[in-house]
Image: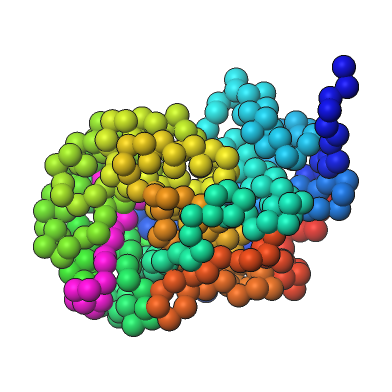
Amino acid sequence: MTPCWEVFVRITDVTTIKLKYDMPVAMADAVHYMPDRPTLLVQVHTDEGIVGLGEAAVYGGYLESIEAVVLGELRQTILNEDPFRVERLWSMMASRVHQRGRGGMLMMGISGIDIALWDIIGHATRTPLYRLLGGYRDTLDAYASAGFYAADKDARALAEEVGTYASQGFKVVKIKVGRNPELMTNMLHDMVRPEYAAVCLEEDIERVRLAREAIGGKVGLAVDANNAWTPSVALKFMREVESFDIRWLEEPVPTYDIEGSALVAHQLDTPVAGYETETGLPGFRELITRRAVDIVQPDVIWTGGITESRKVAAFAQAYGMPVIPHVFSSAVSSIANMHFIASLPNAGLLEFDQNPNPLRTELFEEHIAPSSDGTVGLPVRPGLGVTLNQATVDRYRIDRHTP
């Protein structure tokens, strides 16, 4: 029987672009040493000439690893398919490799393709993506994500740094904590360059004190431990800094320690946020239902794309929880998460990385940045609403291989 509708668009190819910016001074969070900023862009091509753009997260790994997942595992699954059937394609990509796991790198790879599919749909329907997804708001409040560890950057240098963000109009500033080698269970010991810019717990407390002093009492201050602590260390630390009015404590314990995160969340007045390092709805279901978090933090380039992240956000809304997505990569990550956030009734705050990265600031022909009041507007053009700056791509591209 012939269906009463006809498919006008088919997927003809999936390609990737590998980019890397080498930082002049390496930075670090509680456990990760970051001398560069890698980015894997994903493009989904159609027979109508529409090319969707996405990004697959490469946090904590190699560009080639995620690229192999995208081109070696997922590309064949979606070739010749209808990009409008995004839910069906997501399920196909996740199901056909289920024997090798349904999280981690698979979700990163799916994310890049999923975002590109939504970009195609936006272009084909001539609709900005956030409006296609529901269009709850047109502007977002940006918060300054900064305060990383670096060589020769002491607590006073940190305070001087974050003070500039308050003067720029940001209403919330977030800094890193947790790079404490004296803690026996900190995964820092097994990571690259564990000695780099390390501090003791007492020094971290001083960093928080000086940061609060620098930004004043009217600007929110959040802290991010990047999975470094045990529940007892997290509670000890927060008792020392709670007088500095901490907006939220992010990822205090390892992601798998749901009981530990719940213990911290139940004992603190300060909200616990997380976990960006969770991938997919099943993991977030456990964090939410067990009240192991107060603020939910998916990332559309990491959590399975816009399709899966919307389900996480809806589940969080059912439990009365706000969503403040993790956003920390290129401009594609920023713009995709912006559209996602703008479509949600339980979101509105955008993480805006303040570290130098031309892959964030120069990747598009359009300029996407907060205004003087700390807000960011959504693009009005179809899809993601942006155009790659080819000169930036050429400057930071690692190779020119296209399958």
- The percent coordinates of residue 26 (x first, y second) are 47, 67
Q: Is residue 384 left or right of residue 390?
A: left
Furthest residue toward top:
1
Q: Is residue 370 above or below residue 178?
A: below
Q: Is residue 8 left or right of residue 246?
A: right
Nearer to the camera, 129 or 135 = 135
Q: Is residue 161 visible?
A: no
- The percent coordinates of residue 363 (x first, y second) are 65, 68
Residue at the spot x=38%, y=81% of the render? 168
Q: Is residue 388 above or below residue 47?
A: below
Q: Is residue 19 above or below residue 156?
A: above
Magenta region includes residue 120:
no
- The percent coordinates of residue 298 (x first, y second) are 45, 45
Colour convention of the picture:
rainbow
Q: Is residue 327 left or right of residue 194?
A: right
* The image quarter in which residue 135 lies: bottom right
Q: Is residue 402 visible?
A: yes
Residue at the spot x=44%, y=39% of the render? 314
Nearer to the camera, 374 or 131 = 131
Q: Is residue 290 left or right of residue 133?
A: left
- The percent coordinates of residue 322 (x first, y second) are 35, 48
State the extent of the magenta-drawn residues as a range: 213-229
